[in-house]
Amino acid sequence: MLLDVREVAKGYEAGAGRLQVFSDVSFRLDAGEAVALTGESGSGKSTLLHLCAGLDRPDEGQVRLAGQDLAPLDDRARAALRRESVGLVFQQFNLIPSLNVSANLSFQARLAGRADAAWLEQLAARLGLSPLMDRYPEQLSGGQQQRVAIGRALAGRPRLILADEPTGNLDAATGDAVMALLLGLVAETGAGLLMVTHSERLAARLERRLHLAGGGLA
Amino acid sequence: MYRAALLALLSHWRRQPLQLASVLVGLALATALWSGVQAINGQARASYDRAAGMLGQDRLPQLVAEDGQRFSQDVYVALRRGGWRISPVLEGQWRQGETRLRVIGIDPVTAPQTPGGGGAAQADGDLRAFLTPPGIAFGAAETIAALQDVPGLPALRVADDSLPGTLIMDIGIAQTLLAAPGQVSRLIVLPDQPLRQTPLQDVAPGLTRRAPQAEADIARLTDSFHLNLTAFGLLSFAVGLFIVHAAIGLAFEQRRAMFRTLRALGLPLVALTRLLVAEVLILSILAGLAGMALGYLVAAALLPDVAATLRGLYGAEVPGTLILRPGWWAGGMAMAVLGAGAAAAQSLWRVWRLPLLAPAQPRAWVRATTRSLWRQVAIAGALALVALGAARFGTGLLAGFILLGALLMAAALALPAVLAALLAGAARAGRGVLARWFWADTRQQLPGLSLALMALLLALAANIGVGTMVASFRLTFAGWLDQRLSAELYVSAETEEQAARLRAWLATRPGDLLPLWSVEVPLFGAPATVQGIADHPTYRRNWPMLSALPDVWGRVASGEGALINEQLARREGLVPGDPLILPDGGRMIIAGVYSDYGNPRGQVMIAVDRLTALFPDVARLRHAVSIAPESAPVLAHALIDDFGLPEDNVSDQAAIKVFSMGIFEQTFAVTAALNILTLGVAGFAILTSLLTLSAMRLPQLAPVWALGLTRARLAWLELARALMLTALTMLVALPVGLLLAWALLAVVNVAAFGWRLPMHVFPADWLRLGALALLAGGLAAAWPAWRLARTAPADLLKVFAHER
């Protein structure tokens, strides 16, 4: 079992009182499985994704990643787990603007101390980034930036890819192309994928779907 | 992990070289001005220490005459016979023409082994030549070089540890040179005295034992001067730190998204913080090294002026060549590192507290929310109260500097709120859509520019304050010189015999001869001068009296009254009517207090007859001649041609005024230089702020451009904005500067020098400074404006394409 989420609940302090985002959420994700996480705006999709990545802590319940319960881990241990086992893809790309494509692509792998030059070269070629390696993020289009972000997430061969609306900022054609690349590469590496999306069409391309609604999984 | 993350963090600077330059140059300038001042102070203090350390002056107890005068060496012999282990020293001024020297005579056999002391002769190994006429005199290389052609001196040799302007020789040779046969100035009490010795009172009742001094006299006298320099150095450092704070803060803000990404990708918070601390450390070391090199150049450039000032004002000799000490390096680097740490502390704290899921978009650097503005105003108010308290209840130099610091910081902190209020008023009054946009946009820019404007305010206020003080001082000093130098001619004889002939010669010619005779005595525990004054109408008419008893001149002439200078009156809390007891036991009444600018010592004036009665050995060499101005040149020529007085020994009033004003100008040359440098640093702060902000301006300017304003017009508006903000800052700086001037004149000067000056205002100087500030602001804004005017439309369009 790669990801095991059990009876998780999360809420926030709002001005007037506490806003419960969701509760009693449980699901599992196996290695090599690609799962879509859908729901209305504000249903807590990104929040759930953050809990799975160890970026935030649940109010209740348990999140286990690669057999490891995240609850007792401190910031240092969570960070180590993320850099070694998780690849993150954000809607806003979140590339490091002062590093060129090459450095951005290899960044997380180097952070984890396992950069593989051949794999990086292969990734760049697959993602169509080879001619762009010396460019900086500001010199790339949105689609190109997201391809770099996907490459960065996969460069360290993580066990789990967590993607938060990876095509949300791209037009339909570019989004489709990026999605095809992501799914293809995830399948190749045998990683698990949990992807937040608004798009029914994209969700349908994945093996399974989790739908957040009314404060829990529908 | 660390390497990859550090490279990512540092890559920001590679892409933002201007920001990197801001941090490095800002910190280097701050360190340079601070360390430059410290190098000068360190050099001077080391010289004082050497002067004091010479012959154990400060480290060993001494026997001195109760009246401070020389005494017979027979007393020395008697004490030696009584079991005292002591060493005699004769000290005095030797003059020949324009050459003035401090001569120290020692007994090389008994002198303590201290730098420049007996060790000099013994180390040389030529004791016989040292002891027997013409003897050997040791001095600093520059002194020896200057004395090569001066006759009447022993053979000259260089001793590296000697002070400039001082010669050390055998006491017998010195007695001949100083015309003090059989005389000594003091006896150094050596360590390890025998258990049995005749009591001092039995052998030498006229002598008293002086304990080792914690601090040399000259160090005490010059403390306030060095404190002023230090304060200026600190102000420059603070202004420099504003640049560093702004640049580091902006760099941190721009990297907020990167920090979040790094953490999301697996970099622990502790590691990120460590890396950022390391980054600040690396930057501060680089900038610190550059700053120290620059500081050395600043110190080397300013030192000759400072040395001349210290010599002219205090008679303190400081070598004009800079020697760098390890402590200076360590102190300067520590200031650079601590300064950078202080500038980065707030940003580091924010990173430490930054929630992992905080919004990644960089927010405007120090967005001035109403709450933060009010908080700043509240702190400014509290500091203003501190300043008020220091002015009202504080005493001494420390209170003076607390007043200055609190005043400046209060003004700086209040500036953004004041400017925001002024801009809000302008926005309300503005007509037309463009004017309204301009004022509103200017208010929006204020947070990003406020640190640079605060630095400018500090520099301008310091400029106005110090400028007003110096100009007030100059005006008062010139007027005071006119009063004080009422005689037309001032003449000095070389010997007592020549002086007697001179008096007789002048008695047969028109004009009145006024003695200028004085002795140095210890008074209230500090060195002071007692001067004789003749009862003459020129003094009664012109002497600059601050307060006096009725019939003050009658009291002085009768020998019953004495005049004291303002410094002595303030230091000892003396007022007219108080009794005054001179060291020789002479009792009199303080009849008046007079202003005596530029003199760090206490001074007492008594009737010349009383002076000669109390101090029969007083040198009677100097005289003033009161004569009709048109007759003065004729008499001056006659003194030289007919009487045969050397030309250097005759000065007219104008020459002395020129000389005195020269010393005055030199005293404040360093202050003026630091003032200009500080203003330059503030100008640089504006430039860096505008440049770094210009990159963030495009999203704000692009819509206005799209709506129909040309890039050139936008650029002109940017320039106008910078000039307008500079002008407003100058307006705020004016009252702050005047308050600063008042504090300097009424509080700091009184505490530091012992005199209070009337304050004058100089509006023409303000206009000049305002023009200079506008020029600095305009120059700083010109480049960013030019870049804006040249921005390609494609770059502006990216704002709308969300591709930035």
Image (spheres, coloured by chain):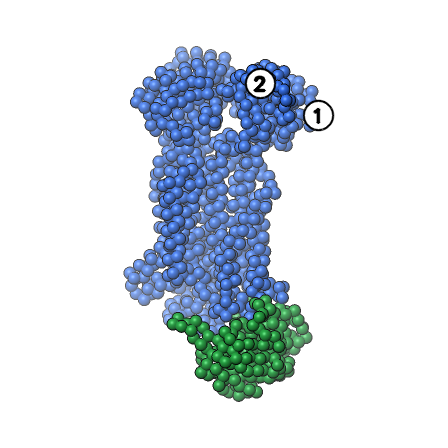
Chain colours: A green, B blue
Residue at point 55% right, 87% down? A208
How many numbered marks does the figure carry?
A: 2
Residue B125 is labelled as 1
Residue at point 53% right, 77% down? A61
Quadrant location of the N terminus of chain B in the rendered image? bottom right
Q: Taking A198 as reference, is B368 above or below it?
A: above
Q: Amino acid at mark 2?
A: Pro
Looking at the picture, how far across and down is residue B35, in whole percent? 54, 45
Q: Taking B69 as reference, is A84 above or below it?
A: below
Q: Tell me the SS state at disc 1.
A: loop
Disc 1/disc 2 C-alpha distance (Å)? 36 Å
Which of B319 and B337 lies nearest the eye of the viewer?
B337
Residue A64 is at least partly visible in this image: yes
| Furthest-right residue in this view | B125
Residue B199 is labelled as 2
Which tag, 1 or 2, sits closer to the chain's start? Answer: 1
Looking at the picture, how far across and down is residue B494, in whole percent? 51, 18
Which of B728 and B432 lies nearest the eye of the viewer?
B728
Residue at point 45% right, 48% down? B679
